[in-house]
Image (spheres, rainbow, N blue to C red):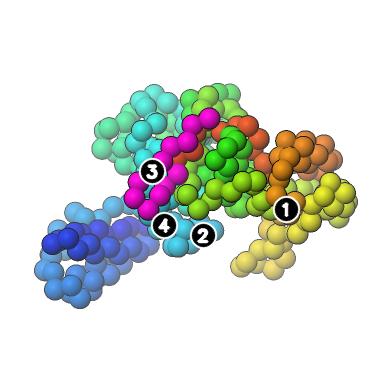
Amino acid sequence: MAKEFTYTADGETVQEWAETEDEAIERACEALDDHGIDLDEEAIREHIEVVPSPNRIKSGAEGVFDERRRRAGERAAQELIEDGMDVGLGTGSTTAWTVAEIGRLLREGDLEDVRGVATSLQSHELAKEADIPLVTLDAVTELDITVDGADQYSENEPTVIKGGGGAHAREKVIDAMADELVITTDEEKATDPLDYPVPVEVMPDAREVVAEWVREAGGEPDLRMAERKDGPVFTANGNLVLDCDFGGLDDAAGTAQELDGIPGVLDHGIFLDMVDAVYLGTDEDVDVLEF
Ligand SMILES: O=C[C@H](O)[C@H](O)[C@H](O)COP(=O)(O)O
């Protein structure tokens, strides 16, 4: 988790984040000086909160500090999580705010007895740092709710595309186990029909033949390459990811069915008819779509 300083005076907001509290204080002092505001270190510390670290999330500071995603993620935690719930904790920049907010509500005594199941190592680490008690996936068979993110959502059907961070196979299990699946996202990710290239997790040795079968199903597969490592991305399950461009998914159910039937595929990123609600952050507020 990173640290963020926020201070508002005379209608002006000074906001700085850093990986450590000391760095955040240093940046806050510089920013306050620039604004001619005098605040001592103790007061600065009082205005520092724990926030998700952009260095550990694929979309970086631009995604994590997108106000619309932050608003949606936090609002979902405030409105949906209740005492005693077992909660699936989604992956990505938007649900990172849900995880951070659940942690804050627990620390401040506004929530109790909540247990989380992480959908990825990223959300596991975040939840640990946010002091959310965690249980392993094999310790539970049902969840009260999962709050997850999406790479694209539809305003007209309860289907999303996920897996931009390669976490979709585990996410699909945890999303399916929940009585309620709520997607947190921002208004820019709405598209009809869905056309985000579908992430397909595939056994490494089977990548060429699976790519061929994806082509026969009408998709154009592209092996996902790593950014700070030579070669391709390996998932948490030791597999590869083919990003498969099908153009617009006029028949999402048909495409999902074809991908389900390909040997060597662990899972794909079409989450068909799974969504109960979408919390979408807008520039001003959070809108809720219910299905
Ligand atoms: O594999 C990653 C997940 O499916 C994420 O939930 C998805 O990529 C959305 O992430 P973000 O909220 O950062 O856009």
Element type where label 1 sits in the image: loop
How far apart are the two marked residues, 2 and 1, measured between alpha carbons?
Answer: 23 Å
Residue located 72% across and 65% down the image: 231
How far apart are the two marked residues, 3 and 1, measured between alpha carbons?
Answer: 29 Å
Element type where label 4 sits in the image: loop
Q: Which of 63 and 118 is in front in this view?
A: 63
Mark 3 CB near ligand 1 (8 Å cut): no
Q: Where is residue 75 in the image (x, y as percent from the top left)?
A: 36, 40
Label disc, if present, on residue 66 of the rendered structure: 4
Would you call the spot at circle 4 few (<14 residues within 10 Å), some (14-19), or many (20 or more)?
some
Residue located 58% across and 42% down the image: 154
How far apart are the two marked residues, 1 and 4, measured between alpha carbons?
Answer: 27 Å
Element type where label 2 sits in the image: loop
Would you call the spot at circle 1 few (<14 residues within 10 Å), some (14-19), or many (20 or more)?
some
Label disc, if present, on residue 206 of the rendered structure: none
In primary-sequence order, the first of circles 3 and 4 is: 4
Q: Which of 83 and 189 is in front in this view?
A: 189
Residue located 45% across and 62% down the image: 62
**Res 119 seen here:** no
Magenta stretch holds residue 286: yes
Against 59, residue 99 (above or below) is above
Against 271, residue 214 (above or below) is below
In primary-sequence order, the first of circles 4 and 2 is: 2
Label 1 with label 4: CB-CB less than 8 Å = no
Label disc, if present, on residue 286 of the rendered structure: 3
Of the residues tagged 1 and 4, which is closer to the observer?
1
Label disc, if present, on residue 247 of the rendered structure: 1
In primary-sequence order, the first of circles 1 and 4 is: 4
How far apart are the two marked residues, 3 and 4, measured between alpha carbons?
Answer: 13 Å
Q: Position of residue 212 (x, y in %)?
A: 87, 52
Please give the count of numbered marks on the rendered protein: 4
How far apart are the two marked residues, 3 and 2, measured between alpha carbons?
Answer: 21 Å
